[in-house]
Image: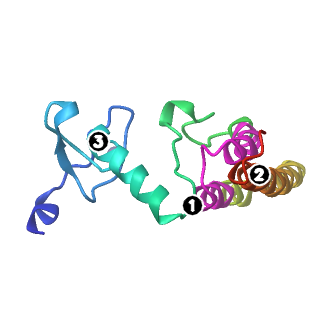
Amino acid sequence: MTATHEQTAGCTWPAGCRNKVGLQPAAAAGGALRCSWHDPDRRGAQLEARKRSGGQPPVTVKDEDLPVQEINSLEDAKALARWLPIAIATGRLGGREAQAAVGALREYRMALADAGVMQELERLVADARRDAAELADLRRRVAAARERGVEV
Ligand SMILES: [Zn+2]
């Protein structure tokens, strides 16, 4: 795969994507290079493969659906912490992605000097993780009930 080596630019997804792996010209994007996630033609196949493998639920969150694009303030961190459990419960965010988001919140917290702010963020992250666990459990139960043919 020498092509991957020669590519210096990343995916051309307009909202911004740093992916440089698996880039291919996307017909739906006029032949512009896209990663498999941002190539509409390949994304469907990727989701199908993931469903068939019975792995994590597909992650369908789009950049524009995120509550914040960066964590630059406590308000950004709070917005992300409030959004996480809902995104997990509705299947928009997979477990691994949620872990990464929690990790990002934790790093932001560590960068903050103010002890009061840190405590509040610590509580928010703990709340978010607890809510996420509860809602993920609920989602599993609903899925199990549906598999048994129960109208939910
Ligand atoms: Zn991309």
Mark 3 within 8 Å of ligand 1, using the beta carbon: yes
Could you tell which of marks 1 and 2 lies nearer the N-terminus? 1
Q: From mark 3 to mark 1, how far is it between C-alphas?
A: 21 Å
Q: Main secondary structure of the magenta part?
A: helix
Residue 114 falls inside the magenta stretch: no
Mark 2 within 8 Å of ligand 1, using the beta carbon: no
Q: Which residue is mark 1?
A: 56
Q: Determine which of the numbered discs, if any, sits on residue 129 in the image.
A: none
Residue 67 position by quadrant: top right
Q: Give the residue displayed 60% in from the left and 59% down from the top.
A: 100
Could you tell which of marks 3 and 1 lies nearer the N-terminus? 3
Residue 45 placed where, x, y %? 33, 50
**Compared with residue 134, is residue 82 higher up or lower down, i.e. above or below?**
above
Type of amino acid under label 2: Ala
Type of amino acid under label 3: Asp
Q: Nearer the viewer, mark 3 or mark 2?
A: 2
The crowding category of the residue bearing disc 2, from other C-alpha atoms within 10 Å (few below 14, some 14 to 19, many at least 20), is: few
